[in-house]
Image (cartoon, rainbow, N blue to C red):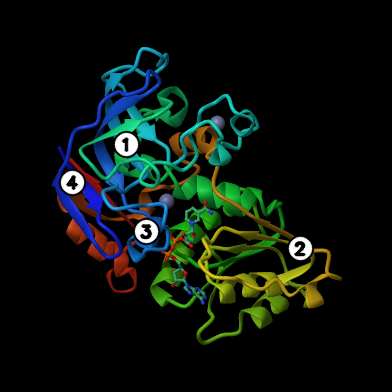
Amino acid sequence: MRALVYHGPGQKAWEEVQKPQVTVDTDAVVRVDAVTICGTDLHILKGDVPAVTDGRILGHEAVGTVEAVGSGVKTVKPGDRVLVSCITACGTCRYCREGRSGQCLGGGGWILGHKIDGTQAEYVRVPFADLSTYPVPGGVSDGELLMLADILPTGYEVGVLNGSVRPGDVVAVVGSGPIGLSAITGARLFSPSHVVAIDLADSRLEAAKQFGADVTVNNGRQDPLSVIQSLTGGLGADVTIEAVGVPATFELAVALARPGGRIANIGVHGEPATLHLEEQWIRNITVTTGLVDAYSTPTLLRLLTTHQIDAGRFVTHHFALDEFAEAYDVFARAGDTGALKVVLSR
Ligand SMILES: NC(=O)c1ccc[n+]([C@@H]2O[C@H](COP(=O)([O-])OP(=O)(O)OC[C@H]3O[C@@H](n4cnc5c(N)ncnc54)[C@H](O)[C@@H]3O)[C@@H](O)[C@H]2O)c1
Ligand SMILES: [Zn+2]
Ligand SMILES: [Zn+2]
């Protein structure tokens, strides 16, 4: 089969590799029908994720058709169409039992396209198939469903739920890439009084408006603090969500929160970011951060099938499965191409 193989920083190739097989009795082998690219894949290609080594097949999001299952797989059978989550769950460890499979101790967590071969391939081996896949519901396209493999659970869990967004809140989202837009989508479910999107790219702020931000701030030109203060009688935002992953945006997210406010960091940070405790100790803030667990996937599936979230508008570009070079190029140059999520399918 063919797969997109990582060969060290900056190097990847769509090449012939061995087709995966069931190796543990809880595995499924899934024929990949549709797959997407994550910002984290770009981090990997920059060399930011050293656990990913030469020869690894990339990708952690897919929709596909089950081709084979091990004898220990009970609910998934050949021919079933499934969503493959970015988080694999053993189901029995302490964290999985607490709904925290991102921290799985039993061999799961974020492993696809990281510690084991991933989904950017014609076929993928999915460990713990019963707990790491979801049946494809009727009336939903593969492209829409793919948005539930990673970005929508991430924005919802690590942003909206960790930040405890409540009705009437003023929510500021720093960064309007796919993750920030997912956080905006999730925040809207709680009827906030305002959702303020902050980004340096006007194209991303335009997208944020489509996704439900009622106020947009280009922080290259405008001061987000004065905008938030004018909306909140000088107090600051009830919840700020950081969806970029650089020190400046974390510090901005903290500065924009009101006393007693909540700051939910989603960004993957490659360098130290400062929490100014000399200013913040007295402000009663709560800061959260973390990796997605994907415990919200069943909830998001119900919201998708009842049309209460629109996942389709994330998909800006379509490619064939062998067009990874073009798809990565369009996705990596999002500022020029307007790409949010690209979908490659058979
Ligand atoms: N915690 C998790 O489980 C998890 C899961 C997936 C992704 N992530 C992380 O979330 C972050 C966002 O992901 P994405 O795919 O949306 O990334 P992205 O690169 O597509 O979007 C980032 C956005 O931030 C904007 N930006 C950059 N610098 C800025 C600044 N100084 N001020 C304001 N805006 C700025 C960019 O213009 C862009 O629109 C990344 O760090 C990614 O690795 C975390
Ligand atoms: Zn991802
Ligand atoms: Zn586990």
Residue that carries the numbered disc 4 in the rendered image: 321
At 62% across and 34% down in the image, what residue appears? 95
Q: Earlier in the sequence, mark 2 or mark 1?
A: 1
Q: Position of residue 75 (x, y in %)?
A: 42, 16
Q: Is mark 4 within 8 Å of ligand 2?
A: no
Residue that carries the numbered disc 2 in the rendered image: 261
The kind of residue tagged 3 is: Ile
The kind of residue tagged 2 is: Gly
Where 16 falls versus 336 (above or below)? Answer: above
At 35% across and 61% down in the image, what residue appears? 42
Q: Is mark 3 within 8 Å of ligand 2?
A: no
Q: In which quadrant will I find the C terminus?
A: top left
Crowding at label 2, few (<14), some or many (≥20) Cα neighbours within 10 Å? many
Q: Is mark 2 within 8 Å of ligand 1?
A: no
Q: Earlier in the sequence, mark 1 or mark 4?
A: 1
| Viewer-nearest residue: 72 or 80 | 72
Crowding at label 1, few (<14), some or many (≥20) Cα neighbours within 10 Å? many
At 41% across and 47% down in the image, what residue appears? 311
Q: Earlier in the sequence, mark 1 or mark 3?
A: 3
